[in-house]
């Protein structure tokens, strides 16, 4: 009985209630686990694998590992509990002839560093069994399974020769890491040397181009003409397509016949190659390096080069590639001789016949020629969005027209609007549909010129 002495209630006696606390449950589980091993004299041991790892200077993780013992069962001749050995009292000591094996079991407190150090000094194999997830309602069979059979809740506290094996693996790993670091340093040095060599070559080429450009600029016009005649084999009159004067004042500080012939010699003459794409940007950069130009007139130079390359395409020297808004305009050299390429003669063929029918000679009076040009200023998108939606909804080629509309802008478009129609024509969209679509949106307009003035 327990005496109850309170200030409000009368003093009295009550029955004593016994509750199983955590410390009682811990002691009971711990004692049951030891009892299992003392009765059975055997248990299954976890495997023992030694792993050492390290990182190379390049960030690569490397490791060495060794399996010292596989998972196995050890049987003892006898077992004893709480025997003092070397200043510590292991929960269980198992004996096999002269050999001893230590077993620690913990519920709340794992083996601390001091005890682990003492175990290392004893140099006796020792494991620890984790009972921390068991509780007061755990049956004896579950405790027996944990102690005898399971290995996932067991860990090695000391394994003979583990440290020696770890040192051996560390030496081998250090050797591999050093080799990898040396290889990395060698590759880095080689890459740095390649970059330095490439930079030196680029710098050498740049200086060489600058010197060549300076020498060329300092040459007299007569010497430049003589040099170009020798390189191109010009004997008599200067070819007309190599002296195309600009409509206004030229942005290139050189006579048209000189810079155009030099460009022709550098990029076109005897350079027919269907697999090589000549970029407008490359030609522009060469002209800027080769001839004097004002930095404020680079856009004018760009337009002048673009017009001349377009002229050479019309003459048949170059083939202009389809417009790509994400790249510089490309060309392919299709004719590389000095004499201009012959113009194609088109003849009409009668239906179901292989015989050419000579064209009729018809006298035409001077007539107006229709050309398409971009408008100088485009309407804002929100002003034409509704009209564009109506036109696309009514068109059988809406997907292509919409893609065209998204791909062009005042800053990214071909010089000639008809190039847009030519691109879509390859996808089955009639030219007139494309131009009508652009005209209705206010992006292009028709320009009429007298054919007799051409």
Image (cartoon, helix red, strand yellow):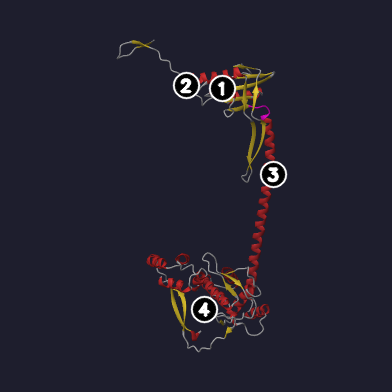
Residue 87 in the magenta stretch? The answer is no
Q: Work out whether mark 3 precedes mark 4 in sequence or the reverse, and give the earlier one.
A: 3
The secondary element bearing badge 3 is classed as helix
In the image, taking residue 208 as reference, residue 32 lies left or right, namely: left
Say if residue 255 shows up in the picture.
no
Foreground: disc 1 or disc 3: 1
Mark 2 and mark 4 lie on one chain; the one further toward the N terminus is 2
Disc 1 crowd rating (10 Å Cα; few below 14, some 14-19, many 20+) is: some
- Label 1 vs 2, first from the N-terminus: 2
The magenta stretch spans which residues? 158-162
Q: In this image, 267 relative to 298: left or right?
A: right
Secondary structure type for disc 2 = helix
Q: Is residue 129 above or below residue 83?
A: below
Front label number (2 vs 4): 2
The residue singled out by tag 3 in the image is 179
Instruction: From the image, tell me which residue sits under label 1.
Output: 144
- Give the crowd class for mark 2: few <14, some 14-19, many >=20 residues within 10 Å: few
Instruction: Provide residue 200's location: percent of width, then percent of height.
Output: 66, 60
- Location of residue 343 with respect to 34 vertically, above or below: below
In space, the residues marked 3 and 4 are separated at their CA atoms by 67 Å
Q: Circle 2 sits on which residue?
A: 22
Distance from disc 3 to disc 2, alpha carbons, whole Å, reads 56 Å
Could you tell me if the residues under marks 3 and 4 are in contact, i.e. CB atoms within 8 Å? no
Q: Which residue is mark 4?
A: 249
Could you tell me residue 192's position as x and y percent?
Answer: 65, 54
> Disc 4 versus disc 1: distance between alpha carbons?
103 Å
- Distance CA(mark 1)–CA(mark 2): 20 Å
Q: Name the N-terminal-most of marks 1 and 3.
A: 1
């Amino acid at each position: 009985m327990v005496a109850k002495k309170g200030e409000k209630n009368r003093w009295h006696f009550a029955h004593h209630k016994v509750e199983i606390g955590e410390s009682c449950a811990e002691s009971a589980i711990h004692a049951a686990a030891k009892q299992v091993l003392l009765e059975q004299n055997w248990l299954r041991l976890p495997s023992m694998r030694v792993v050492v790892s390290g990182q190379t200077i390049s960030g690569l993780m490397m490791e060495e590992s060794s399996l010292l013992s596989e998972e196995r069962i050890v049987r003892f001749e006898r077992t004893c509990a709480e025997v003092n050995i070397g200043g510590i009292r292991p929960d269980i000591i198992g004996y096999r002839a002269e050999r001893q094996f230590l077993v620690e079991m913990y519920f709340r407190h794992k083996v601390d560093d001091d005890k682990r150090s003492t175990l290392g000094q004893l140099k006796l194999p020792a494991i620890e069994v984790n009972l921390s997830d068991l509780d007061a309602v755990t049956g004896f069979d579950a405790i027996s399974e944990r102690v005898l059979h399971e290995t996932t809740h067991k860990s090695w506290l000391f394994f003979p020769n583990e440290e020696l094996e770890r040192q051996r693996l560390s030496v081998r790993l250090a050797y591999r890491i050093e080799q990898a670091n040396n290889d990395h340093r060698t590759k880095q040095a080689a890459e740095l040397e390649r970059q330095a060599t490439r930079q030196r070559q680029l710098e050498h080429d740049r200086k060489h181009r600058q010197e060549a450009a300076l020498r060329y600029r300092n040459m007299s016009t007569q010497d430049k003409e003589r040099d170009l005649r020798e390189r191109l084999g010009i004997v008599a009159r200067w070819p007309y397509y190599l002296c195309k004067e600009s409509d206004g004042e030229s942005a290139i500080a050189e006579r048209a016949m000189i810079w155009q012939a030099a460009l022709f010699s550098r990029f076109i003459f005897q350079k027919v190659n269907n697999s090589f794409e000549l970029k407008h940007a490359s030609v522009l950069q060469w002209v800027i390096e080769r001839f004097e130009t004002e930095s404020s007139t680079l856009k004018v130079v760009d337009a002048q080069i673009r017009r001349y390359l377009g002229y050479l395409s019309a003459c048949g020297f170059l083939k202009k590639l389809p417009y790509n808004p994400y790249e510089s305009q490309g060309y392919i050299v299709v004719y590389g001789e000095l004499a201009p390429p012959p113009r194609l003669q088109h003849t009409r063929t009668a239906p179901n016949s292989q015989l050419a029918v000579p064209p009729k000679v018809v006298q035409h009076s001077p007539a107006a020629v229709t050309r398409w040009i971009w408008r100088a200023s485009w309407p804002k998108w929100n002003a034409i969005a509704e009209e564009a939606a109506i036109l696309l909804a009514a068109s059988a080629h809406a997907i292509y027209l919409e893609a065209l509309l998204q791909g062009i802008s005042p800053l990214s478009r071909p010089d000639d609007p008809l190039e847009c129609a030519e691109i879509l024509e390859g996808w089955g969209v009639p030219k007139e549909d494309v131009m009508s679509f652009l005209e209705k949106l206010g992006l292009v307009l028709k320009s009429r010129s007298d054919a007799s003035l051409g």
